[in-house]
Image: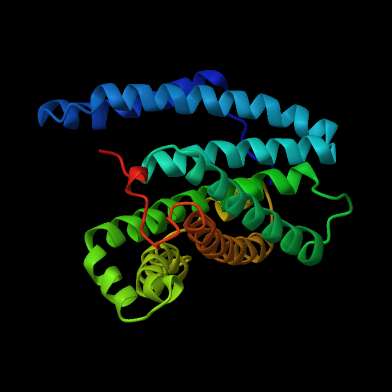
Amino acid sequence: MEIIQLSWLQLAFGFIILIIPAAIFWWYNTGLNRKMVIATIRMTLQLLFVGYYLEYLFEYDNTWLNLAWIMVMVVVADFATIDRSDLKTTRSLVIPIFWATFLGIVLINLFFLELVIQLPNFLEAQYAIPITGMVLGNCLRSNVIGINEFYYNLKENNERYLFYLASGATRSEALYPFFQRALQKSANPTLAGMATIGLVSLPGMMTGQILSGSSPMTAIQYQIMIMLAIFSGTILSVFLAILFCNRAVFFDNDMLDESIFKE
């Protein structure tokens, strides 16, 4: 069965549905209509740009170009993570989070793309780019939750941290409960999604493959692989991000540099 192609007119007609949330926002005076319009325009323009670019990327399929695009995605996710974590965009955060996310993505890609799927070409664009995008999007969300929870929890419970240090604990030992809570908070959304997938929701990749004519079982196999990649990637990324950042945001006396927080 071939996928039904949408015309640009059909796609434009679909925007009419936004009248419903716009009317609800207006009636309750939420002030969200302007944000909705801006978000919709940005989404459309960004996806159109990426769509045209990916067509070229898939056709050219150069390993170095694919890797460069992945790095661009990681850089954008890096700044978005810091901004949404309500922390200042400082060098002590930007560089560690970039390398944590990049290493997490690379390790996950190497394992699933090269060892599990066994691509004929290294970092083949058709597989590497969309899979990286899905994993990276979830890494961004989990990084925001984990980093925010770790540093703001540490700030609010600084006396507890100082008590551990005064009792003879090393910095790593004193930070252990804060690390533990950050990992729990960041993992919960993904774990909840994994526990209900298939029964409560049909994920995007699986739905897309079925709509494009793939066998449901093939779509399920890929979806299981993607969920494993997403979960492993998010936890590794959060762990490395906090670990790397801690090397730069603490003074030699084990005190946290509170200039990383927004006023």
- Which residue: 40% across, 26% down? 40
- Give whichever of 108, 153 is nearer the camera: 153
Residue located at (54% from left, 36% from top): 76
Image coordinates of residue 191 in percent, x first then y, are: 44, 69
Count how many numbered circles sit on residues in the image: 0
Indicate left or right for 96 with 38 as reference.
right
Measuring from the top left, give residue 99's x and y in whole percent: 62, 50
Residue 218 image point, x, y percent: 69, 62
Q: Residue furthest left?
A: 28
Identify which residue is drawn at 47% across, 68% down.
194
Q: Is residue 80 above or below residue 109?
A: above
The percent coordinates of residue 148 (x first, y second) are: 35, 53
Observer-nearest residue: 7 or 63?
63
Residue 74 versus residue 43 in the image, above or below: below
Could you say which is closer to the camera, residue 123 or residue 88?
Answer: 88
Q: In this view, does 33 lie to the left or right of 236?
A: left
Q: In this view, does 132 lie to the left or right of 77?
A: right
Residue 15: image quadrant is top left
Q: Dividing the picture into quarters, in which one does residue 62 lie?
A: top right
Q: Which residue is drawn at 64% across and 54% down?
A: 105
Picture layout, residue 122 above or below residue 157:
above
Most extreme residue toward the front, as rendered? 253
Q: Which of 262/101 is in front? A: 262
